[in-house]
Image (cartoon, helix red, strand yellow):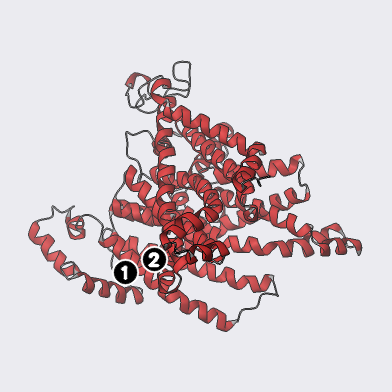
Amino acid sequence: MLRYIQRRLLIMIPVLWGVVTLVFFLMYMLPGDPAATILAQSGGKAEAIEKLREQLGLNDPLPVQYMRFLSNAVRGDFGNSIFLRQPVMQIIAENLPATIELAIGALVVALAIGFSMGILAALKCNTWVDRLCMLTAIAGVSMPNFWLALLIMYLISAINTYYGVLILPITGQGGIQHLIVPSIVLGFAVSGSLARLVRSSMLEVLRQEYITTARAKGLSRRVVILRHALRNALIPVVTMLGLQFGYLLGGTVIIETVFSRRGLGRTIVDAIVWKDLPVVQGAVFVTATTYMLVNLLVDISYAVIDPRIRYS
Amino acid sequence: MRAESPWRIALRILVRNRVAMSGLAILVIMSLLAVLAPAIAPYDPDAVDILHQLEAPSQAHILGTDLYGRDIFSRILYGGRITLVVGLIAVGIAASIGIVLGLIAGFYGGALDSIIMRLVDVLLAFPRILLALSIVGMLGPGLLNVMVAVGIAGITGYARLVRGSVLSAKENVYVEAARVVGCPDHIILRRHLLPNIIGPVIVLATLDVAAAILSASSLSFLGLGVQPPTAEWGAMLNEGRQYLRTAPWITLFPGLAIMISVLSINMLGDGLRDALDPRMKI
């Protein structure tokens, strides 16, 4: 197992190199001159721009710039933000926890709704309960999350206006209360695809002979469903969770913006709007790395769920 | 007696699927409304009418008006043209590049396969919307750039699917037979392999149109996609955000339009999956 993890981490190195390279070239090809952008507010005289270009190393040949970027990135140094004038890594360190918190909150919501709906639909297969669950699931997948966010915001503020009580805080940072609404919005879409997968996976497992055997032995329905069926139905679901976590990380970009929350997603959007290249590069790189590590964790968790899987 | 072709069987299964047919019907209606927008729309979608700004739905404006007094219904009709076309073109870009990469990687194997798949791995390391966002950041906001960004961000799915299918399909006797009679590679790829693996690709592409519409409207919502005053559903939602409490209809109806179109495509895509590729059932 340990060797498998080591090997996977080694495989990550060339991919990370590819990610850094892509991030560098994406931003290198950006139209406009970063030096001119930095000095735009203060008038931006040609001499000053040229001096800054020299300082930033923008006049060096492309391979030199690339190698410098690469060696800095290896050391976790993406330079300073153009607008905030802080080290990029410091900005990321300040914002990453909020994003991870939101993604995990959304994952909890997605798992809770997705599993309940999926199991219920499978057990009540071909009844109105099944159809209702699947309709909700496909609606969840099809609903733009920013729209759902705005609808819930409207609903909560309408309740507040009408009854004079704020049932939950909608925007900004704070304790777990501030996390509830954004997590529900972000997790809802994932819960839809999760419910569909749990349903079909459960139906597949419930047809197996060992389920009939377990029932014939006189085990209670609850034990059969939770211990025999669900555990076996989990494997395809866990495979999807890795991909869905990527969706959640990407989704934070929108949810953080709508709910005015601090986080890496919002940092990226703001940095793109302001053309703050070092921040975009650093934040995109960190998000991609987080996503890759989560996928590694998902792969490792297979062995925990299914003892038949052993990594060599 | 001639055996029925697999395509006919698939079509028969699809036609019997009521959910998929409802999805198709909704999609056809929405497309018709978008195409016929100039004939149906009661107002010019960009016509500013300061005297009627932020008006609630009424007989004159059935879905209300926005901050500039523009008719929401007319803007949704015109917006449909953009949203549906963006979805189709983005998927066209993703599928055409992804299929070619997957065919080459799967058919030739070796170093070419490794290079292509490592590139795909790099793209896969980015959550899709983040990759699209970064590309738009590079290209700048705008309709064409959104289509390109969402398209490039979707390449990986096709490349992996096609490569996997080619790896197993190329072992078939008909591929060997084609080789023996001296068929050049591009003919084998185009005429023999592609038609045999295209089923799951069609399913992926259909469901992907829905995903592309959501991604593109998300970018517009963030202000990085289609620019004002062009009517586009995501951009309309963005404009309505500030007036959520006083004029919720500006936000409600474009969002509903996005949801109905994405839902109908998903319904059709699910039906296609059941008909064309029973293994992919979710």
Crowd rating for badge 2 (residues with CA inside 10 Å; few <14, some 14–19, many 20+): many
State if disc 2 and disc 1 touch (CB < 8 Å).
yes
User: Which chain hosts label 2?
Assistant: A
Q: Is residue B139 above or below residue B168?
A: above
Q: Position of residue B244 (x, y in %)?
A: 46, 34
Q: Specify the label residue A285 is tagged with.
A: 2
Q: Nearer the viewer, residue A81 or A122?
A: A122
User: Which chain hosts label 1?
Assistant: A
Q: Residue at x 75, y 60 (%)?
A: A205
Q: Amino acid at mark 2?
A: Phe
Crowd rating for badge 1 (residues with CA inside 10 Å; few <14, some 14–19, many 20+): many
Q: Residue at x 17, y 57 (%)?
A: A36
B176 horizontally vs B41: left or right? right
Q: Of helix, strand and loop, which one carries label 2?
A: helix
Q: Residue at x 48, y 47 (%)?
A: A171
The residue that disc 1 covers is A78
Q: Position of residue B195 (x, y in %)?
A: 52, 53
Q: Position of residue A195 (x, y in %)?
A: 66, 51
A171 horizontally vs B19: left or right? left
